[in-house]
Image (cartoon, rainbow, N blue to C red):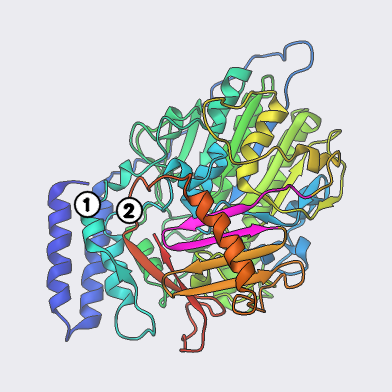
Amino acid sequence: MKKWQIYSLAAIVAIAALAGTAYTFRKDLVLYAVATRARDATPVAPNREIVWQQGPTEAAEGQRPPNIVLILADDLGFNDISLYGGGLIETPHIDALARSGANFSTAYSGTAACAPSRAMIMTGRYGTRTGFEFTPTPPGMTRIVDMFYNDGTRLHEMLVDREAAANAPPFREQGLPGEEITLAEVLKPAGYHNIHIGKWHLGNSEEFVPNAQGFDESVMLESGLFLPEDHPDAVNAKLPFDPIDQFLWARMQYATSYNAGEWFEPKGYLTDFYTDEAVKAIEANRNRPFFLYLAHWAVHTPLQASKADYDALSHIENHRERVYAAMIRALDRSVGRVMEALKENGLDDNTIVIFSSDNGGPGYIGIPDVNKPFRGWKLTYFEGGIRVPLFIRWPGRIEEGVEREMPVAHLDLFPTIAAAAGAPLPGDRVIDGIDILPLAKGTETAEPDRAIFWRDGHYHAMRKDGWKLQFAERPNKVWLYNLNEDPTEQNNLAEEMPEKVAELRALVDAHNATQRDPLFPAVAEMPVTIDKTLEEEATPEDEYIYWPG
């Protein structure tokens, strides 16, 4: 971003802040400034064809290691998949993938927000161990969301640390350090061609981009529109109650890049575009081992559907739910097309396919049942914020239709994939995840003897032996649940069982003593009501947490 653009936006925001008697005008003025800055910040070229690097014309003789396809959805709620008996629509392709391998029905995300979860998948290490603890915040977002959120209409105000924001590294430089070893870097010596498609969110400067972190090719999400807002094939659902949504609509562009090159427009609806490129990448690499990390932007806001998917769901009357369901429909279709591409290229039997979501569904989209039956949303450590689907398919190695109920985590994907590929783990650092292939295969049936930890600033959580502890400074509260008896966290036992709280908190303290300080600060804290969407008015009786980010 150019300095004059930063100064201009700051001036407009400062003037707007003084215009207290013209609040509506103030919002329009600020949004106009943000949109103008976005258009001017980085030019977006017309679409151009991506020419994928071609592998050998023939496969080498003998057995080769399995191909690996990791499909990661964004903000997909646990109840968005029809396999679990709910959802707005059927998800036949995702369900079929789950039934064709191992369904880990008690799987947890690395944290309750996107970027640190993705870092944990890539490294097998806690974000508090690498320092990638908080989600990088785009320029201008904190100040604008503060202005829009703290308008006097809400029970809980957003908290902003202006000093931390002023001293934080630039957005592009808030990334996963190059000294960390990624999954792609572990697989490369084992002969893998590594491909990234979609969201990255682990830094945008030279040190942090996928091509610097072990990926041979990368088609990267550069901004967040699925189609231009005024595109004839776009059906939009804006969220007037969500300040972040207003920021995204003003700030986002329709843009991608290849190998960190110039920005250009994707071709068609973004989820379909990424799928098209994934199919091409599979075809180009059919004769050599490859790792494909397909990191969809769907179903993250802004809520945008293709007209074709929207029209196919005319039975859903609520417009917002219909747009959201149409986005899920495109995601499900993507899974089906990837599986078909593997089959058509003769790779079906020698490919591990993994599907998950980076965290639970958010309450700020105003759709109440996305995480049903669990409480909480993205940005909370209640089950709704961190319980995610996790399916692993490997024909001939993992039986079809098995369900594994023991708790596993995103941290486990790194050592699991490395083990399947025959790639040794780094010996010079702690790897927090475990290889869950024996659990998937059924050669190991016992629950792993370990605790799983989560931390975001002052907000902590852990799970061990069915017990779940959460505690925070804002609000100053402790939650203790016996998930074996109370899986939806209805009965807080913290006051009844202080000894258990002390026991588990001691484990948290011991764990935190081995972790490091964050690489960059949290610049704001967002209040999240546990049992209501953002569209619903909070009351003093409602439970809530503050999420630092």
In the image, taking residue 397 as reference, residue 108 lies left or right, namely left
Q: Name the foreground residue: 313 vs 350.
A: 350
Tell me residue 518's x, y (percent): 38, 48
Instruction: Name which quarter of the figure residue 516 lies in.
Output: top left
Left/right of residue 232 with respect to residue 290 in the rendered view: left
- Disc 2 residue type (three-letter): Pro
Residue named by callout 2: 521
Q: Are marks 2 and 1 in contact (CB under 8 Å)?
A: yes
| Label 1 element class | helix
Query: Which residue is at a point 49% across and 64% down the rendered structure image?
Result: 379
Q: Is residue 258 left or right of residue 481?
A: left
- Asked if residue 383 can be seen in this view, the reply is no
Q: Which segment is the magenta one? A: 447-464
Image disc number at residue 547? none
Q: Quadrant of residue 241?
A: bottom left
CA neighbours of label 2 inside 10 A, class few (<14), some (14 to 19), many (20+): many
Q: Which mark is residue 167?
A: 1
Q: Exactly how many numbered labels are in the figure?
A: 2
Q: Nearer the viewer, residue 4 or 320?
A: 4
Relative to the observer, which residue lies in front, 521 or 366?
521
Instruction: Let me know if residue 329 appears in the view.
Output: yes
Q: Earlier in the sequence, mark 2 or mark 1?
A: 1
Asked if residue 262 is positioned above or below residue 174 in the image, the reply reads above
Q: Residue at x 57, y 42 (%)?
A: 121
Main secondary structure found in the magenta portion: strand
Give the percent coordinates (x, y) of residue 16: 16, 73
